[in-house]
Amino acid sequence: MQRSLIVITLLLFGALTAVALWQHGYWGILAPNFQSLGAAQVFADLVIALVLVLIWLWHDAKAIGRNPWPWIGVTLAAGAFGPLIYLLTRKAPEVDQGRDRWPAAVEKLP
C-alpha cells in the first residue's frame, strides 16, 4: 500500500472526525449507533472489522518485532486511526529476489 494513499486517507478521515467531534462531541458520535437496529448493525460491522484488523495487526507487529499494545490502545480509543498510523509507521516489506514479500503474518495464513 502506498504511503501517500494512507496519508491522504488519514488527513481526510481526520478532518471528518474533527468536524464531527466539534459538532457532536465524542459521545454524540457514538449515541446514534444505539437508537435503531440499522445503526446498531453498522456499528457491529465496524466492531467486527476492527477486531479482524487488530488480529492482523497483533500478528504482524509480533512478526516484525514491534509492540502491538500502543496500536491496540489507539484503535480502541480512536477507531481506524490506530491501524492507519500503524501502517504509516510500518517499514516497507523486504524485497526478496526482485519481488515484494508479504508481511510475515500473512505468510503464515493457511
Image (cartoon, grey):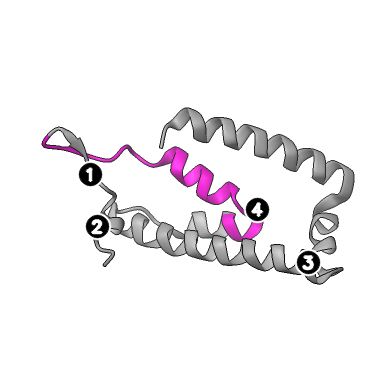
Q: Label 3, label 4: how many angstroms apart (C-alpha)?
A: 22 Å
Q: Which residue is mark 1?
A: 101
Which is more N-terminal, label 4 or label 1? 4
Q: Label 1, label 4: how many angstroms apart (C-alpha)?
A: 30 Å
28 left or right, relative to 73: right
Q: Label 2, label 1: how many angstroms apart (C-alpha)?
A: 9 Å
Kindly report which numbered mark, 3 or 4, lies closer to the viewer in this rendering: 3
* Disc marking residue 4: none
Q: Label 1, label 3: how many angstroms apart (C-alpha)?
A: 40 Å
Which is more N-terminal, label 4 or label 3? 3
Structural crowding at the residue carrying mark 3, measured as other residues with C-alpha within 10 Å and reported as few (<14), some (14–19) or many (≥20): few
Q: Label 4, label 2: how many angstroms apart (C-alpha)?
A: 29 Å
> For the magenta stretch, what is the residue range?
75-97
Q: Amino acid at mark 1?
A: Arg
* Disc marking residue 107: 2
Structural crowding at the residue carrying mark 2, measured as other residues with C-alpha within 10 Å and reported as few (<14), some (14–19) or many (≥20): few
- Residue 88 in percent (x, y) is at 46, 38
Picture residue at 58% right of the left edge, 54% below the top: 74
Q: Which residue is mark 3?
A: 38
Q: In the depicted view, which residue is nearer to us: 75 or 109?
A: 109
35 left or right, relative to 52: right
Kindly report which numbered mark, 1 or 3, lies closer to the viewer in this rendering: 3
Q: Which residue is mark 4?
A: 78
Kindly report which numbered mark, 1 or 4, lies closer to the viewer in this rendering: 1
Which is more N-terminal, label 2 or label 4? 4
Q: Amino acid at mark 4?
A: Ala
- Residue 96 in percent (x, y) is at 14, 39
- Residue 36 in percent (x, y) is at 84, 69
Q: Amino acid at mark 2?
A: Glu
107 left or right, relative to 34: left
Which is more N-terminal, label 1 or label 2? 1
Q: Is residue 67 above or below residue 99?
A: below
